[in-house]
Image: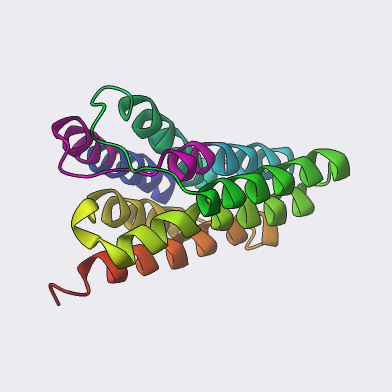
Amino acid sequence: MLEYLVFVGAAIQMIGIVSYGRDVIKGTVKPNRVTWLLWSIAPIIGTLAAISTGVKWSVLPVFMAGFGPLIIFIISFVNKKSYWHLTKFDYFCGASSVLALALWLITKQAELAIIFAIISDLFAAIPTLIKSWQEPETETVAPYLAGLFGIFSSIGILKMWTFCELAFPVYLLVINLALILIISRKRL
């Protein structure tokens, strides 16, 4: 019965993404395209690696953590004024993220794939963490709060409590909390 909780979590994650997507179209938030593109790739790879080791529905929130950013990346092209201007540092983080994914492709081991996917996702997050610190008004907490619910739903139905099942959700918990705190710090 608890496994149905991940579907509720995925639905809430989608609500957060739709809310953020609406704000992107209106131009009230400005996503960093490097971050959002790479945020779509790393969790999907983490999902595939976890599934290859037998993880079942508990990986759905990790998949949603990749699917949602892919939608935001695509939406960021709708309003030409709604994206963050990229710097050399953004491209460096993007290249580091891609390198981590390439290392996973070379190793082809599920545990290493998840480690490299987490490293990749973290490098992808750095530009948005910095942007959110410097200009928190260019972000909103909606997708990160919704992501937390998805993560908790995933952790709530864990059966094996293995590295492959737990690593990416714990990482997503930390990065979502960090973004929420950074974006909200002036309001708190």
Q: Is residue 85 left or right of residue 162?
A: left
| Residue pictured at 32% horizontal, 30% vertical | 76
Front residue of this view, candidates 174 and 26: 26
Up/down of 24 relative to 155, above or below: above
Which residues are the magenta region?
17-40
Q: Residue furthest front?
A: 88
Up/down of 70 relative to 166, above or below: above
Front residue of this view, candidates 116 and 138: 138
The picture places residue 141, in percent across and down from the top left corner, at 24, 56
Q: Is residue 165 left or right of residue 108?
A: left
Q: Is residue 57 visible?
A: no
The picture places residue 80, in percent across and down from the top left corner, at 26, 27
Front residue of this view, candidates 166 and 78: 78
4 within the magenta span? no
| Residue pictured at 35% horizontal, 58% vertical | 131
Q: Is residue 170 left or right of residue 108?
A: left
Up/down of 165 relative to 83, above or below: below
The picture places residue 108, in percent across and down from the top left corner, at 84, 41
Up/down of 19 relative to 182, above or below: above
The picture places residue 64, in percent across and down from the top left corner, at 43, 39
Q: Is residue 143 visible?
A: yes
